[in-house]
Image (spheres, rainbow, N blue to C red):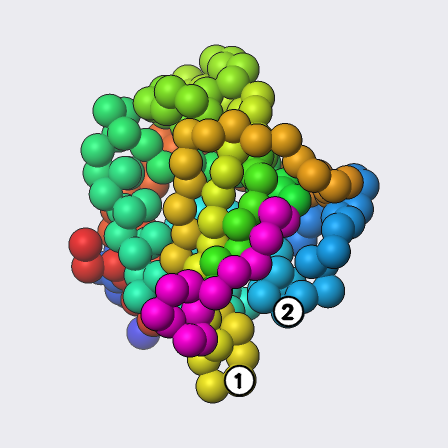
Amino acid sequence: MSTALVAGALAGLLAGCGSAALPVHAEVEWQGSDTGEFEDDPRVQVVRDYVVQKYAADNAFNYSDPALTEITTHATALSWARSTAQAIDSSPVDSADLWEGPPSFTVAEVVKRTGQEHTFEVRVCQRVAPRLTLAVRDTFALGEVQKLDGAYRIEQEHFVEHEYWVSDAQGSWRVTSEGQSSEECEPTDDFAVGTYTTPPDIDLLHETTPDMVIGPDGKRIDW
């Protein structure tokens, strides 16, 4: 088979499979440092690792990186992937979000979930990093909004209360869920602000389709 025919056949195969999964870039440059009585707690440490990996996964529409799947559950990562695919499908009424960095937060307390022996709530005061989106849909978390290349850059002004559920799975901690309120709060300690060294690609907001989203099993998401 000629080189041209081989190239054509490969192109056809790739077209049939969809675009290749995007690489996850989770490297962060930090300014400042996180302090407080809970920073040595392994449940807090896994949350800090989780937010770096999860928001980097958002930027790549790829939730299969072991750095994420090893510190959360399959169900949690699958939920994020499906939510992203649905947001892309609803664009521009809804929209996926791309993040300039992971959230910044200080820890308020770590408490056991009632009736759940191996599950804890890590309660934090959090502000997300600036994000890029096609839809301005939040109320309490909007902050400063700028138009940028056919999209919006939103910089959250206030910190709000947030919680992460962390469970012990065979001797290692995993983040199983999270939730945010609209209640503003004040950080209790010094905190670090992180920026991904590979910035999000704003063009993806205009070009990505739902079938480009990769689930935790490494396959295109069935949403």
Judge whether 41 appears above or below 146 on screen. below
The verdict on residue 115 being magenta is yes
Image-based side of 24 in relation to 15, left or right:
right
x and y percentages locating residue 222 in the rendered image = 19, 59
Q: Magenta stretch?
A: 107-119
Q: Which residue is mark 1?
A: 171
Q: Residue at x 70, y 39 (%)?
A: 188
* Mark nearer the N terminus (1 vs 2): 2
The reply to whether residue 218 is visible in this rendering is no
Q: Quadrant of the image for the N terminus?
A: bottom left
Front residue of 219 and 76: 76
Mark 2, residue position: 42
Mark 1 closeness class: few <14, some 14–19, many ≥20 residues within 10 Å: few
Query: Considering the image in quadrants, where does the C terminus appear?
Result: bottom left
Q: Amino acid at mark 1?
A: Gly
Residue 23 drawn in magenta: no
